Amino acid sequence: MRFYGLALLASAVVLGACKGGEKPATDTTATAAPAPTSGAAAPTAAAGAVAKIAATGQTHEVKMLGDDKGYRFDPANLTIKSGDAVKFVMVSGGPHNVAFDPNTVPADSKAQLDANMDQKMSELSSPLLLNPNEAYTVSFGGVKPGQYPFHCTPHLAMNMKGVITVQ
Ligand SMILES: [Cu+2]
């Protein structure tokens, strides 16, 4: 869908250039356009962008809870392998989300982790999960070993935090 938008934009630019006719259109858009039309990997082909890497390993589940025991992830600390995925499931007390702090995530995997997260609210920050059984899965494909602290943005002050250790 994103590519489709770009394609429309590109044709609009070309049309504009033809209409105006002032500058000789040395359009690089024409050469860029045909390449990523097929396949799932297409949307990330933009220059300089890091492509999402799908998980190939195990999927670990983390519950997002808010009740009379407080706001928490369960488990809050988990150890996974690079290439695994973590599925965050909204259970109670939402809205919850999962956000990695750009300042504490290992620098050499920050761009990859960010690329692996869909529908972000901001860098390394998932959308809010409002309803029970809503889930958000983060691929750790291409993410290097290290410690990845995360938190829930709405409940950060209530200490809703955890750490994913990638082996
Ligand atoms: Cu929360």
Image (spheres, grey):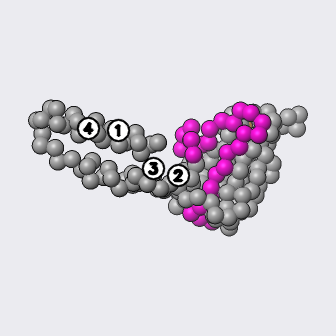
Q: Which residues are magenta?
A: 118-146
Q: Secondary structure at mark 1?
A: helix
Q: Are marks 3 and 1 in contact (CB under 8 Å)?
A: no
Which one is nearer the viewer's eye here, 113 or 69?
113
Q: Nearer the viewer, mark 2 or mark 4?
A: 4
When asked about the image quadrant of residue 79, the answer is bottom right
First in sequence, mark 2 or 3: give its number: 3
Q: Amino acid at mark 4?
A: Val
Q: Residues within 10 Å of mark 4 (few under 14, many from 20)?
A: some
Q: Amino acid at mark 3?
A: Pro
- Residue 152 visible, this angle: no
Q: Is residue 33 rendered to the left or right of residue 165?
A: left
Reading the image, the residue beneath label 3 is 43
Q: Amino acid at mark 1?
A: Leu
First in sequence, mark 1 or 4: give its number: 1
Q: Secondary structure at mark 2?
A: helix
First in sequence, mark 3 or 1: give its number: 1
Q: Nearer the viewer, mark 1 or mark 2?
A: 1
User: How far is the residue under mark 3 from the one under mark 1?
Assistant: 14 Å
- Residue 113 visible, this angle: yes
Which one is nearer the viewer's eye here, 139 or 2?
2
First in sequence, mark 2 or 4: give its number: 4
Q: Residues within 10 Å of mark 2 (few under 14, many from 20)?
A: many
Q: Nearer the viewer, mark 3 or mark 1?
A: 1
Reading the image, the residue beneath label 4 is 13
First in sequence, mark 4 or 3: give its number: 4
